[in-house]
Image: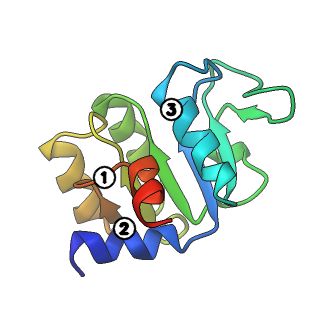
Amino acid sequence: MNNKEKMKDMMSKKVWAVVGASNKPDKVSNEIYHTLKSFGYETYAVNPSYNKMDDESKCYPSIEELPKVPDCINFVVPPTVTLKYLEELDPEITPNIWLQPGTYDDNVVRYAEDKGFNVVHEGECTMAYLRLYG
């Protein structure tokens, strides 16, 4: 499956987690979170630094504490943090990961693919994809 097909397949998943989501409106991670929600995705914020994303939405300290297992995990954190999360995740439970620009390096991509994750790491970010094709 080429990268464009992987992106299309992942965007067909309905439950997303945004790791590194910020409740600060000027942050890209906040915009990604809200864009996914505005396109009808059930979206959960994951960031141990915040309790809330906005007046309505909770921010969870970890993926394990989400009320649902996400179909796709969108990473918006530095590569070292991405790798830490990937080491703790099971691709049998959460197989789909979308690595935003700046969240990965060759080591992270190699680790994710070797572990068996379905990985998107090239091309548009989720916001750009949704705005172009959503």
Q: Is residue 51 left or right of residue 114?
A: right
Judge by depth and name the residue closer to the eye, 5 or 80.
Answer: 5
Query: Label 2 to label 1, Cα distance in Å?
Result: 9 Å
Residue 51 point in image, percent of width and height = 76, 23
Judge by depth and name the residue closer to the eye, 51 or 36.
Answer: 36
Amino acid at the residue labelled 1: Glu
User: Dots 2 and 1: beta carbons under 8 Å?
Assistant: yes
Judge by depth and name the residue closer to the eye, 3 or 61.
Answer: 3
Question: How many marks on residues?
Answer: 3
- Residue displayed at 72% across by 32% down: 59
Q: Earlier in the sequence, mark 2 or mark 1?
A: 2
Amino acid at the residue labelled 2: Met
Amino acid at the residue labelled 3: Ser
- Residue displayed at 57% across by 30% down: 30
Q: Residues within 10 Å of mark 2 (few under 14, many from 20)?
A: many
Q: List the residue tagged with mark 2.
A: 7
114, above or below 121, in the image: below
- Residue displayed at 65% across by 38% down: 45
Q: Nearer the viewer, mark 1 or mark 3?
A: 1
Q: Residues within 10 Å of mark 1 (few under 14, many from 20)?
A: some
- Residue displayed at 43% across by 36% down: 76
User: Dots 1 and 3: beta carbons under 8 Å?
Assistant: no
Q: Earlier in the sequence, mark 3 or mark 2?
A: 2
Q: List the residue tagged with mark 3.
A: 29
Q: Earlier in the sequence, mark 1 or mark 3?
A: 3
109, above or below 52, in the image: below
Residue 134 point in image, percent of width and height = 51, 65
Query: Label 3 to label 2, Cα distance in Å?
Result: 18 Å
